Amino acid sequence: MGDSVDVLVTGGCGFIGSNYIRYVLEKYPEYHVVNLDKLTYAGNLDNLRDIENNPRYTFVKGDICDKERVKEIIPSCDVIINFAAESHVDRSITGPEPFIRTDVVGTFTLLEAARQHDVTFVQISTDEVYGSLQEGEFREDDPLKPNSPYSASKASAELLVRSYHVTYGLPVLITRSSNNLGPYQHPEKLIPKFTLNALQGKTLTIYGTGENVRDWIYVLDNCTGIDTVVHRGSSGEVYNVGGENERTNLEITHKILEILDRPLSLMEFVEDRKGHDFRYALNVEKMRELGWNPQHSFEEALERTVLWYRDNEWWWRPIFGRG
Ligand SMILES: NC(=O)c1ccc[n+]([C@@H]2O[C@H](COP(=O)([O-])OP(=O)(O)OC[C@H]3O[C@@H](n4cnc5c(N)ncnc54)[C@H](O)[C@@H]3O)[C@@H](O)[C@H]2O)c1
């Protein structure tokens, strides 16, 4: 990439996108970032309050499904990083339609504009596209067996991205990360929700027995992973960005209660989520070959994250329990 780089980030007012924008603006003084975000219930301008006046940052309110809007923005970009998505599995079970619209049709709309201008396209995907695993680890060439409307919409998007590479020669990269933890995550998700409930002495409701296993990665390690792929990845390739931190939901819950010094009696077990994947685990050899390694241990990341929510009520108070 040349001296001045224009990056289009979609969904930059969400959890990972906002952390990523802050990270790249700090790391690369020659970058200008345009953030295209629809500001759904999950998008929050407060996530980037501290950089909103940075001259190298531009916010554009808009929908990635809006062809005209997308066509206006893309010609001036060197790279598109597509974070925009409906991202909550429970919501995809009760109402899948917005997931198909944004995750599939939105990605298609961006790809169509990208191919007119040969802009590098980076798709931010998820380990959930692989489906569930009893043992071992998912590798990038394993089959996609998504089990929820959310993961199916993300898998569909990936297939479109791949096809634009093969058919039109569009330069593309795909990252599949495991569950992220860190600041600015919407309080509908497990770690912020349990932290805020615990802080307020409310019940922490756990699906099934709480034995489901997720691999966790600190959001800044995902940001460095994405950055590594953007700069050193091979076009057309998929990269697993995992933290190698497998934990059961029960272990996470215990740890949050311990950090906040709250009693285990706040836990309540409820009927399991429909189609609940048992376990995800990622093989990250391909990322290591690019020279990437996560820098944060899970214990340190969890403590830092829980304490960030405890100390930043200004951020969560307006949105907790809303949406
Ligand atoms: N959070 C995780 O643990 C995780 C793990 C793996 C992959 N991912 C993927 O990473 C990406 C970002 O996840 P997140 O947790 O930051 O999500 P998020 O829900 O916090 O943020 C999504 C953002 O996209 C915006 N958006 C939604 N629909 C849009 C549309 N039609 N047009 C423009 N903007 C729109 C929202 O306003 C919001 O700002 C998603 O693609 C998700 O699938 C997330």
Image (spheres, rainbow, N blue to C red):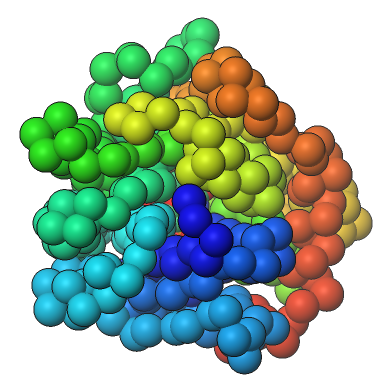
One can see residue 40 in this view? no
Kindly identify the residue that appears in the image at 50 percent across and 9 percent down: 135
Q: Is residue 207 above or below residue 291?
A: below
Determine the quadrant in which ligand 1 lies. Answer: bottom left
Residue 52 position by quadrant = bottom right
**Spot occupied by residue 289 in the image (x, y as percentages of width and height):** 60, 18
Residue 166 in the figure: left or right of residue 47: left
- In depth, the one of 62 and 210 nearer the eye is 62
Residue 8, quarter of picture: bottom left
- Left-right relation of 230 to 107: right
232 is higher (above) or lower (below) than 183: above
Q: Position of residue 26 (x, y in %)?
A: 71, 66
Q: Position of residue 43 (x, y in %)?
A: 44, 75
With 110 as the anchor, is 299 left or right in this view?
Answer: right
- Locate the C terminus and report the quarter of the image it occupies: bottom left
Residue under the point 64% across and 40% down: 217
